[in-house]
Image (cartoon, helix red, strand yellow):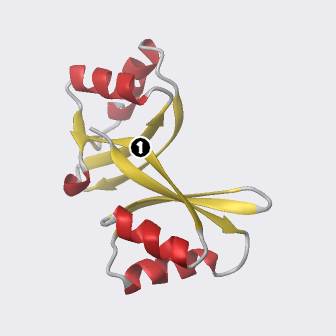
Amino acid sequence: MTIKQMSVFLENKNGRINEVTKVLGEHSINMHAFSMAETTDFGILRLIVSDVEHAVEILREKGYAVILTDVVCISCPNVPSALSEILDNLAKHQIFIEYMYAFAQENIAHIVIRPSNLEECVKWLSKEGCNILDKQHL
């Protein structure tokens, strides 16, 4: 199972991230997870949100460049080496991780993964008994 992630391209300018969060909040769109990466000229805000289609629509109306990407979100125990074991299994099956980010809620960690081969990643995570999340269970 995959979920849609939004990538919003932002110029490196004071207040740009805040503008995005305000627009989403004004439209009752909740941010479940996000990651920010930057280069010298622009940043990429990656988001998992409650209403992807509406978020894309309103951000594009405001002039933001937005793309959608399929990612995998899993949960695992929030204990030492839990993620390492999962990544070891993916590496054993030649699945490269392009990027990932994570957040924890008490004893559970949620990890968003953008693998090189989405279908193979989901297949092996399922075979390993990983809890693959859908948007409703974030």
Residue for point 42% across, 77% down = 24
Look at the picture and state if 120 lies above or below 79: above
Whole-percent x and y of residue 78? 29, 44
Dot 1: element:
strand
Q: Quadrant of residue 63?
A: bottom right
The residue that mark 1 highlights is 70
Q: Nearer the viewer, residue 114 or 27?
A: 27
For the N terminus, the image quarter is top left
**The residue under label 1 is which amino acid type?**
Asp
Marks counted in the figure total 1
Considering every residue shown, the one lying at the far bottom of the view is 26
Q: Nearer the viewer, residue 19 or 64?
A: 64
Residue for point 41% across, 70% down = 55
Whole-percent x and y of residue 43? 66, 61
Whole-percent x and y of residue 136? 20, 56
Look at the picture and state if 61 lies above or below 105: below
Q: Quadrant of residue 113?
A: top left
Residue for point 23% across, 19% down = 127
Look at the picture and state if 130 lies above or below 136: above
* Residue count near mark 1 (Cα–Cα under 10 Å), binned few <14, some 14–19, many ≥20: some
Q: Quadrant of residue 124?
A: top left
Whole-percent x and y of residue 84? 40, 28
Q: Nearer the viewer, residue 64 or 129?
A: 64
Q: Is residue 19 left or right of residue 77?
A: right
Q: Is residue 76 left or right of residue 18?
A: left
Look at the picture and state if 17 lies above or below 40: below
For the C terminus, the image quarter is bottom left
Q: Is residue 91 left or right of residue 98?
A: left
